[in-house]
Image (tube, rainbow, N blue to C red):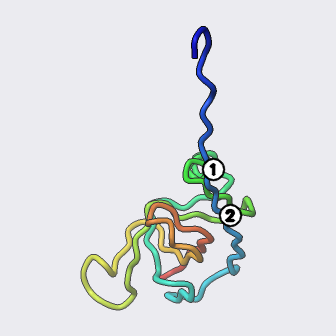
Amino acid sequence: MPGGAPPPTKTATTTKTVTVTAPASAPTGACSTGPIQCCNSVSKASDPVSSLLLGLLGIVVEGVDVLLGLDCSPITVIGVGSGSACSANTVCCQNNNVGGLISIGCIPIIL
């Protein structure tokens, strides 16, 4: 534009709303929502770092007490090898569909 700044460009943002109601506890070694996960970190959605990460990914979690598993991978209860051991946080999560980076609606379990 002669003599002025170009008009501002608009970018579309996509958000994903997740509603989670996690059970109070999970039986030993049981997970009815998918594979048991081994997560490097577990925190509440209200945690500043978790909240920032959710915002950057465009994920809206309804409920600040929802537990999130960060950097998770599935493990097996029965078997041998590295896939059956977890040296971090063993959890069962309702939504593991965020590429392993974040699992939503987690509850700790004891193997």
Name the residue at the top extreme. Answer: 3
Find numbered disc 2 in the image and state the secondary structure of the residue it sits on.
strand
The residue at 62%/58% (across/down) is: 59
**59 over 111 or under it: above or below:** above
On residue 51, which mark appears?
Answer: 1
Tell me whether circle 1 and circle 2 mark residues in contact (CB < 8 Å).
no
Q: Residue at x 59, y 42 (%)?
A: 11
Classify 96 as above or below 46: below
Q: Which residue appears farthest toward the left when viewing the image?
A: 81
The furthest residue to the front: 2
Q: Position of residue 56 (x, y in %)?
A: 56, 48
Q: Position of residue 5 (x, y in %)?
A: 60, 16
- Could you tell me the amino acid type at mark 1? Ser
Q: Give the answer, above or below, for where 85 lies relative to 71.
A: below
- Which quadrant is home to the N terminus? top right
Closest to the observer, 97 or 46: 97
* Residue picked out by circle 2: 17
Residue with the most extreme right position: 63
The crowd level at tag 2 (other Cα within 10 Å; few <14, some 14-19, many 20+) is few
* Of callouts 1 and 2, the N-terminal one: 2
Gap in angstroms between the C-alphas marked 1 and 2: 13 Å
Task: Say which of marks 1 and 2 sits in front.
Answer: 2
- Image label count: 2
5 versus 68 height, above or below? above
Q: Residues within 10 Å of mark 1 (few under 14, many from 20)?
A: some
Residue 44 x/y as whole percent:
64, 59
Helix, strand or loop at label 1? It is helix
Question: Residue drawn 47% across and 80% down?
Answer: 36
Picture residue at 71% right of the left edge, 70% below the top: 19
**Which amino acid type is marked by label 2?**
Thr
Q: Which numbered disc covers residue 90?
A: none
Instruction: State the image coordinates of residue 98 (x, y, percent, origin top left).
Output: 50, 65
